[in-house]
Image: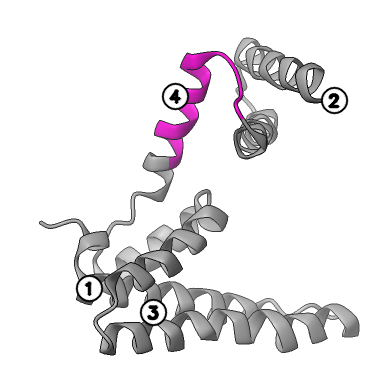
Amino acid sequence: MKNFLENIDDLLRVNCAISDYYVEFTLNNLNPDEKLRSVQLDVMLPMFKSYRVDSEKYHSEGKLKKLQSIYNGIEKEASENIMLEQYVFEKIGIKLGMRERYNRKLNKIIERGKLKNENEYHMIMDQINILCQLKDRDDEVIDNLNTLIIDFEKKYA
């Protein structure tokens, strides 16, 4: 099967499914606090709906690169969202592979043994947070990741 990122019709389906997921998630998890609820309804919901509207527009114009850009922006924020991947797969039968791509990037950083920029710094910090929450965590791996963080902070602090 051709990579969905190269197929304009599949990419439209993916972007729309992601939009649907976030709209449903937002509506099903409205915060009882009035200020936060307002942000969810006035800011987040329109933003998530715009993924679909913009994707449909770019699809009708035949703009694959614009569709890819929407997806890439979403992927940066959603790469750890296993529920999103499952939702999209169940809804349209396309496996996103966000987590696999994220893990490949993470492994490259770890193998290199140093962080090059803030994005990598945040990836490692996120991974440390995830690993620290596991019952059967590997403290040696966490220590090695912390060393990357410490070295980066020393260099750029």
Magenta range: 102-116
User: What's the image's color scheme?
Assistant: one colour
Dot 1 surroundings within 10 Å: few (below 14), some, or many (20 or more)?
many
| Residue at 34% across, 83% down | 58
* Residue type, mark 3 in image: Cys
Which residue lies under the disc numbered 4? 108
Quadrant position of residue 48: bottom right
User: Is 106 a magenta residue?
Assistant: yes
Q: CA distance from mark 2 to mark 1?
A: 43 Å
Question: What secondary structure is marked by label 3?
Answer: helix
Which marked residue is nearer to the observer: mark 3 or mark 2?
A: 2
* Residue type, mark 1 in image: Ile
Dot 2 and dot 4 residues touching (CB under 8 Å): no
Question: What secondary structure is marked by label 2?
Answer: loop
Q: CA distance from mark 2 to mark 4?
A: 24 Å
Dot 3 surroundings within 10 Å: few (below 14), some, or many (20 or more)?
many
Q: CA distance from mark 3 to mark 2?
A: 41 Å
- The answer to which of marks 2 and 4 sits earlier in the sequence is 4
Which residue lies under the disc numbered 3? 16
Most distant residue in the left direction: 1
Q: CA distance from mark 1 to mark 3?
A: 12 Å
Question: What secondary structure is marked by label 4?
Answer: helix
Which residue lies under the disc numbered 1? 8
* Residue type, mark 2 in image: Ala
Asked whether residue 132 is in view, the answer is yes
User: Is 92 a magenta residue?
Assistant: no
